Image (tube, rainbow, N blue to C red):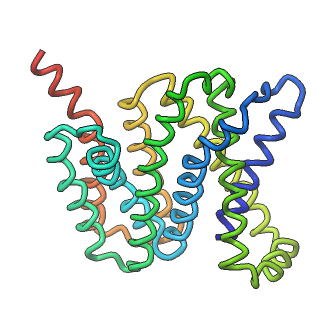
Amino acid sequence: MTISALQLAVGAVYGIFLWLAPDARAKPTVTFDDIIKMLPVAFCFMGAHSASVFALSAGAVSFGQIVKAAEPAFAAVLSQFVYNKPVSKAKWLCLPVIIGGVILASVKELDFAVSALISACIANLFAAFKGNENKKLMETEGLKDRMGSVGNQFALTTILGFLMSIPLVLWREGSKLGQFVEMFKTNPVISTNLIASGLWFYGYNELATMTLKKTGAVTQSVANTAKRVIVIVGVAIVLGESLDPMKLLGCAIGIGGVFVYSIIDQLLAKKNA
């Protein structure tokens, strides 16, 4: 919790800096009611990030990324049964392929941990809620104009998410904060990586939001699929994690299923046109 919260803090400071720096970014003119409406998105954003960080620390990074690739399955269930946005039969048929790939990749996982699996699934659930709530937020009358930009919306979400994470950090790891502060001061690896990861996380998510707005869901899905492949293989090589054929096959099936899930409706629509 401490690491994930401080990564959000780094992003929050950077977002505020852009508002204060000359000619960087215009400040939003949101109201108190707007902030209240943003709280569900910020909470889900904080929850997804915290659960993801825990999952990646509890087991192999590649394994956590593979499980997180199953996020569309959670999004489909929520869209269908919570937000009343029906999912096509073709997409439902893709879900067993995605889940099967994740299971196949996990069968021979040397660093398998139940806590990593559960945490990654919780992260997927929060991320699915965040996506739906974020869409509702952007459709709110007048809010888009008061935000000013997608960058401002993400900055406010990050700031609110960090503030929400503070009570959880104090509750779960408050007794260890003094020890962590001392490590942060004396160990440059911790301080440098914490700040760098916070900036990379903020930059990636803001850019992903802008890309989604300017291009579309299909292009974003292609980029996100490529990102997961690069992360899984790259991290496994750098950290010396296992990359046996069974794991690679499961990874390919799971992520390939996610990609097909993202474009299947468009493909069928062109075929029937």
Left or right of 134 on screen, residue 84: left
Residue 240: give x, y in percent of width and height.
48, 71
Q: Position of residue 172 (x, y in %)?
A: 65, 79
Place residue 168 in its image quadrant. bottom right
Residue at horizontal 67%, vertical 41%?
Answer: 35
Between 67 and 249, the one nearer to me in the picture: 67
At x 72% / y 57%, what residue is drawn? 163
Q: Residue 28 at what x, y percent from top left?
A: 75, 29
Q: Nearer the viewer, residue 93 or 221?
A: 93
Single out the residue that lies furthest toward the front: 33
Q: Position of residue 264 (x, y in %)?
A: 21, 34
Quadrant of the snapshot with the C terminus: top left
For the point 81% across and 35% down, which residue is it? Answer: 18
Query: Left of 136 or right of it: where is 204?
Result: right
| Vertical arrangement, residue 76 with respect to residue 33, above or below | below
Left or right: 126 in relation to 157: left
Q: Is residue 106 above or below residue 43?
A: below
